[in-house]
Amino acid sequence: MRFTENFERAKKEALISLEIALRRGEVDEDIIPLLKKINEKPNYFTTSSCSGRISIMEMPDFGDKVNAKWLGKWHREVSLDEVLEAIRKHREGQLWLLVRSPILHVGARTLEDGIKLLNLGVSCGFKYSNIKSISDRKLIVEIRSTERLDALLGENGEILVSDDYMRKLVEIANAQVRRFKRKLKRFEERIEEL
Amino acid sequence: MRFTENFERAKKEALISLEIALRRGEVDEDIIPLLKKINEKPNYFTTSSCSGRISIMEMPDFGDKVNAKWLGKWHREVSLDEVLEAIRKHREGQLWLLVRSPILHVGARTLEDGIKLLNLGVSCGFKYSNIKSISDRKLIVEIRSTERLDALLGENGEILVSDDYMRKLVEIANAQVRRFKRKLKRFEERIEEL
């Protein structure tokens, strides 16, 4: 496959991009050791990542990412107070509390290397892991889990749910964060197997 | 690749399973023409599918699919009344309104066939499409979109949100259904390109 021939060049480019992102502080802190471990492996390189998050987002319409605005974002468990503080900034459009699973995009040298990584991800609990794309330039494995929450909180400056309801949502969101953090840890420990 | 050698046998088995599921009425009606079109293509076969849905689900804990119970399920837009009727059956655990994107699993003869289908899916708006797995037996492409909603409605027999909130949720859910139905139609029209 063509992407195997282009692997060394693609990895070199990806490592330069990562270096720039690291210097700019654009990489989620808690995932940096995992990225390093993967990039030390001769047959893999990372191209993008998010360590998973809880966020409060304002957007004109659900799914309109382009015009979305983060009012709060955390790569860890949150307190109800933090969430309440973030939603006080709500002015217009729809207000959502979102949970997103960690997501990692990893280039692999050969199809076999890609399948190996995919299977490792699945066995560490990242059940939505898959081969995201294959082009002449690269084969990208996506490591992703099932944790996700999309909860409508308000609209046009008005909060539509009670504090008690919000407390329950925060509990659920935090449980999801604990769950995907455990998976990330397990995955990091098992990178050696690649 | 081994899965290419095993393609004919895997396709034969999948078609038999589909025939059984069709007779039992276990296949979502509105997706049957699409499944037929794909299975007529010599290099592909379908292994499982859901045409996308809105559902009202009761579960002990969020994500506990095993103990979840559907109180209502629709592969189409719903009315607020239908939703209100379904939630009246709520007794215990957490009560959720969920939207899930259509999902199709399709076996492909070669890696190239798989990539072709994956790219067609993405270009029809199924942005979460991917190669789900590759084993000696088969290569499975997943066709999947981004539409999703997870809204907590109640807990332990108690409804936690207002009718007005529920009306907004139903509007959002219906907009998602319209969106993924359009994508399905586009995809069905373009299967010929494979």
Image (cartoon, coloured by chain):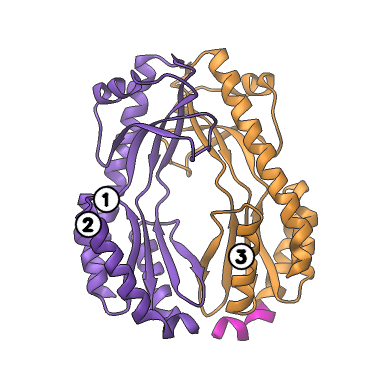
Chain colours: A purple, B orange
SS at badge 1: loop
Mark 1 against mark 3, which lies toward the viewer? 1
Q: In the rendered image of this protein, does residue A90 appear above or below residue B68?
A: above
Q: Is residue B125 left or right of residue B21?
A: left
Q: Is residue B68 left or right of residue A192?
A: right
Return the x and y of residue A152 as percentages of the image width and height: 47, 26
Mark 2 → mark 3, Cα distance in angstroms = 32 Å
SS at badge 3: helix
User: Would you say residue B8 sits in the magenta stretch?
Assistant: yes
Question: Which chain letter matches label 3?
Answer: B
Q: Are marks 1 and 3 on the same chain?
A: no
Dots 1 and 2: beta carbons under 8 Å? yes
Closer-to-camera residue (B153/A10)? A10
Residue for badge 1: A26
Split into 4 quadrants, where in the image is the C terminus of chain B? bottom right
Q: In the rendered image of this protein, does residue A76 appear above or below residue A32?
A: above
Question: Which chain letter matches label 2?
Answer: A
Residue type at numbered disc 2? Leu
Residue for badge 2: A22
Return the x and y of residue B1 as percentages of the image width and height: 54, 85
- The magenta-colored residue range is B1-9
Residue for badge 3: B119
Q: Are marks 2 and 3 on the same chain?
A: no
Residue type at numbered disc 3? Asn
Question: Which chain letter matches label 1?
Answer: A
Label 2 neighbourhood size at 10 Å, few (<14), some (14-19), many (20+)?
some
Q: Is residue B136 left or right of residue B13?
A: left
